[in-house]
Amino acid sequence: MQTLFMSIAPIFVIILYINIKDKYESEPKKLLFISFILGAVISIIITTILYSFFDIVVPLPNHYSVWQQFVKAFFVVGFSEELSKYIIVRYYAQRQKEFNEPFDGIVYAVMVSMGFAATENIFYVLEGGYQVALLRALTAVPAHATFGILMGYYMGKAKFSNNKVMLNIMGLLLAILFHGTYDFFLFIDFIPGISIGAFISLIIGIILSRKAIKTHQKNSKFNPNISEENKQENSL
């Protein structure tokens, strides 16, 4: 039970943090819960199917070269996992009438990402124990959160833009880029000291995520300090 608690505790810390940051208009708890469950179940299923597809199309040997690790990080893991989250945000959350400001893109993308991370974390922690729980609480879980925030930032903008397709795709590609970079440096740990690149990419992702949160907060149509012009731009 303690191991299970350790695996999900950082997930809910991040969820609480994002909901606190959504300070002008909170999202319905029902939609947040559904987004989380879809991430925990459907996103995992989609990822598993995509992994199986890649195993057939681009099978990789047991001992990967640097190039093969690059392919695995960006085109297998990063692409599969972020696409699975994107599909849920795009075709479930983004269509809800309660998704009524750009910041909501961040909220729902993080909920889906945390659902995915919760399922993934439980498997890893049950297998690896407390040390894995602590390590992932400081690395993999916040990494998934940053991927979600960066994706959600652009998907939030897309909902209220005439350029929806490009902004949605930009969110997906940015999440894949950061996910792939993070994993790539971890996958090539046979090169001494190279794994530090994963932590650098995570730090950069956190910095950009904080900026994304502040930007959407500032421009929220529910922000009492925002101009009427910006309110109209961010409204339906």
Image (spheres, rainbow, N blue to C red):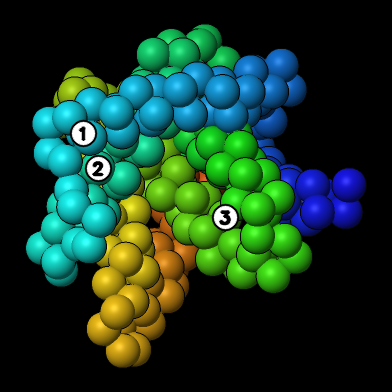
Residue 230, image x, y percentages? 39, 36
Going 62% across and 69% down the picture, which residue do you hit?
A: 135
Going 31% across and 45% down the picture, which residue do you hit?
A: 77
Question: Does 139 appear above or below 229?
Answer: below
**Direction front: furthest residue:** 62
The residue pinned by badge 3 equals 141
Q: Secondary structure at mark 3?
A: helix
Going 10% across and 63% down the picture, which residue do you hit?
A: 67
Residue 140, image x, y percentages? 52, 59
Near-viewer residue (165 or 117):
117
The three-letter code of the residue at mark 2 reads Val
Near-viewer residue (140 or 107):
140
Which disc number belongs to residue 76? Answer: 2
In which quadrant of the rendered view does residue 205 lie? bottom left
User: Circles 1 and 2: CB distance less than 8 Å?
Assistant: yes
Give the mark nearest the N terminus, 1 or 3: 1
How crowded pointer 2 is (Cα within 10 Å; few <14, some 14-19, many 20+) is rated as: many
